[in-house]
Amino acid sequence: MIIYHNPRCSKSRQALGILRENAEDPDVVEYLKAPLGQAELGELLKKLGSPAHDLLRTKEDEYDELGLSPNTPEEDILTAIVAHPILLERPIVVKGRRAVIARPPELVEELL
């Protein structure tokens, strides 16, 4: 298991706590310190099975500054996240070929 984690985010901390309470010891990737590349984001998107826009934190200033919207092409969204990792929604938990955006944190239970 992998969790793309921001330790300053309460939802991210809660999701990590749920995993650990269920005897999971995920690899923790602090994506703000080790940003994901375009290819990694593309693979993550496939595992999520959702539109690229779902990866975005729409309340971040960068979202508006970059003129992002649900109509923004997938490649442009991934490029924006690579350049501005703060835009990546969190936490994202991956197990094998599946992933969930754990908002609310209890959604990680789908992978247990």
Image (tube, grey):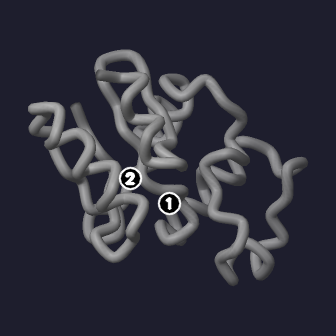
Residue 103's mark? none
User: Residue at image x 42%, y 52%?
Assistant: 91
Q: Mark 2 or mark 1, which has the lower sequence index?
A: 2
Q: Residues within 10 Å of mark 2 (few under 14, many from 20)?
A: many
Q: Position of residue 56 (x, y in %)?
A: 64, 57
Cα gap from disc 2 to disc 1, whole angstroms: 6 Å
Residue annotated with mark 1: 82
Q: How would you rate the neighbour count of disc 1 (Cα within 10 Å): few for under 14, some for 14-19, many for 20 or more?
A: some
Relative height, residue 47 to residue 64 (above, below): above
Q: Quadrant of residue 49?
A: top right
Q: Is residue 55 left or right of residue 12?
A: right
Instruction: Pick whichever, 37 or 65, lies toward us.
Output: 65
Residue 51 % position (x, y): 72, 35
Mark 2–mark 1 CB contact (< 8 Å): yes
- Which sits in the foreground, 103 or 79? 103
Residue sitting at 25 percent across and 38 percent down?
Answer: 2
Label 1: element kind: helix
Q: Quadrant of the N terminus?
A: top left
- Return the mark for residue 36: 2
Identity of the residue furthest to the top in this view:
97
Disc count in the image?
2
State the residue at coordinates (30%, 24%).
95
Looking at the rendered structure, the kind of residue marked 2 is Leu
Residue 112, position as x, y percentages in the image: 29, 22
For residue 74, side relative to residue 47 (left or right): right
Q: Is residue 14 left or right of residue 70?
A: left
Furthest toward the right, the residue is 71
| Vertical side of 89 occupied by 54: above or below | above
Q: Amino acid at mark 1?
A: Val
